[in-house]
Image (spheres, grey):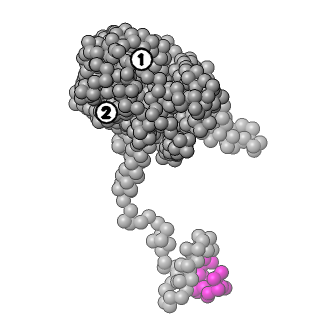
Amino acid sequence: MESDTGGNVNPAMEKDPDRYQEAMGNGVAADGLVAGAGDMPGLDVGEVQLDDFVGANPDYNEEEEERKYFRRKRLAVVKNVLAASLGGMLTYGVYLGLLQMQLILHYDETYREVKYSNMGLQDIDSKMLMGINVTPIVALLYTPVLIRFFGTKWTMFLAVGIYALFVSTNYWERYYTLVPSAVAIGVAIVPLWASMGNYVTRMAQKYYEYVNYKEEHVLEQERAPRGAYNTYIIVFQSLFYGCFHLSFVCAQLPMLFFLNSYLYDLNHTLCNVKNCGTLSKGMLPGFNATVLQSLPRSINLIIVESVLMGAAFLSMLMVLILCGSAYRPTEEIDLRSIGWGNIFQLPFKHMRDYRLRHLFPFFIYSGFEVLFVCTGFSLNYAVCAIGLEKLAYIIMAYGFSAAACSSLALSMLRLPRQAPLLAGAAIHAILLIGLFCWAPKPRGPGQAPLLYLVAVLWGLGSALNKTSLSTLLGMLYQDKERQDFVFTIYHWWQALAIFVVYLWSGLPMKAKLSIMLLTLVASVLSYLWMEHKLARHVLFRVPKIPKPRHKVRGYRYLEAENSDETGSEGESEQDSDGSQEERAGRGRQRHQQKCAYEQALGEEDGENVG
């Protein structure tokens, strides 16, 4: 009897052919073992223990391997947050930088006449801005459906792709390319930032689960104790907004390294400006219609736009390749299986919760302040005093300050959660009062230090405002079924505020500052009242999330109709009594778990079902 390898078989194998067949059935490793044993004189193959080769490694430490596995999972979560943060930074930086450069070039009448003759660039720009600012008004109707349909990660990827599309249309500046792409940007604004906020919060929750993987509620995939995620939410939101505010720095790089060399100095651009600051009205009246002393060559513009397009494409790849999924596949199925009608209605139903209603003024002010610093303060104060060539440095001072001061939100780990948000509001209130009383002199470079100081302090307030609001929402709404609705509401109110700022562009500066100051005061009072009601344990009203309605007959949902049971293929028309009792027992167990879960929800949250 010979083996497949051509060697002779040990006589012990001839005595026990079943053992030989078992060894041969185990594959190449068994072949090698038999052949090697046959070549060794005096060694009986029957004495060789295969368990030494295929059994458990005596040096294997299950607990140590488990610890290493979850450490890799935690590192993957950190990688996801960094990739999403840097992707958002590049996306928004490219968008702001291109839009700013485009508006400056199109403002110059010489550039319009020479490059595009009678095409009407100013009219195209006005319709672009209208598309960007007006379209998000209806975002509340489709954003939750979009996030649930595509998933959080793929919504981020889709929105980043739309921003890249906007960059690509600038290679051929025409009405039918610029305006539709601007409308697409307006459509993508709320889904992008709502999915980003939801994604970072979910990563904080997953990090907690990977740190506490031995806890019973994590093993059973049950609801975590109230406040368990707070530490990680604070840290991850601070990291995200630290990267996000650097987008204002990135946005100024095209102007700093390219466009500044073509600009006139302040004595030319500001020669007809009479009033600055609080005395001004509209968007810097009297500003010279020619700001370019020489026109940039088309090849140079194409190079700059290609660099921006490359950065936008890089952000798409970062989201696509480096960002993992926010939910498990079964969780994604559950989230979208509650019915599209319910998904459409739930954002409106969540607005009945007094916690969200009391935060509406802060959401509105958050939209006011970020656009005011980029337009009202930058133009009517900074550019009016020190010239257009210094605009990039003012915005960069704001961006660096906001990015660095986002880490101050970590004080929520030791201080009450109200402290950073109220501190940011106090800083902005002082600055608004100061700006209301200050009118810089036109063409006054000596006022530059004070303007930079205001930009830095405004960045400090913005960092505390935005980081604290997102962190607060993650703390108040820890249910993964609600977070996309809550962040959609937050960024939708921000988009409405930006639309209001777009409408008030022709108002006097004192009116703008007054509206912002009143909104800020109302925000603080409303927020303090919300915290007071929470301290008194006033019950809040959140809508009940419907149970998933699964239509799939796959392995995930084989509960009521199990196609793999005996008799499903015609083998038997009736189940045995034992299998029926077993299914009944499983049904009772699921019912008890459901009742216990709903009772826990009622005790911990004090929910009143709408």
Tell me where residue 191 appears, x and y as whole percent: 52, 28
Task: Say which mark, if any, is on residue 215.
Answer: none
Residue under pointer 2 = 397
Of residue 357 and residue 82, the one placed in the foreground of this image is 82
Q: Secondary structure at mark 2?
A: helix
| Mark in the foreground, 1 or 2 | 1
Q: Which residues are magenta?
A: 1-20
Relative to 301, residue 489 above or below: above
**Would you name the residue on which mark 1 appears?**
286
Q: Is residue 40 positioned above or below 345 on the image?
A: below
* Residue nearest the viewer, comparing 102 with 476: 102
Residue 525: x and y in percent read: 30, 10
Compute the Cα span from label 1 to label 2.
26 Å
Identify the residue at image location x=61%, y=28%: 117
Amino acid type shown at disc 1: Gly
Q: Residue furthest bottom?
A: 41
How far across and down, in percent of the image, does residue 589 sit? 51, 31
Can residue 396 be seen in this snapshot? yes
Say if mark 1 contacts mark 2, CB within 8 Å: no
- At label 2, the amino acid type is Ala
19 in the magenta segment: yes
For the point 54% across and 34% down, which residue is it?
163
Q: Secondary structure at mark 1?
A: loop
Where residue 17 appears, as percent x and y from the top left, is 62, 78
Task: Tell me which numbered mark, 1 or 2, is placed earlier along the sequence.
Answer: 1
Q: Nearer the viewer, residue 278 or 18?
A: 278
Q: Is residue 117 above or below residue 327?
A: above
Q: Is residue 335 left or right of residue 247?
A: right
* Rendered image quadrant of residue 283: top left
Asked where in the image residue 224 lies, by quadrant, the reply is: top left
Give the residue drawn at x 60%, y 85%: 9
- Tell which residue pokes out farthest to the right in this image: 570
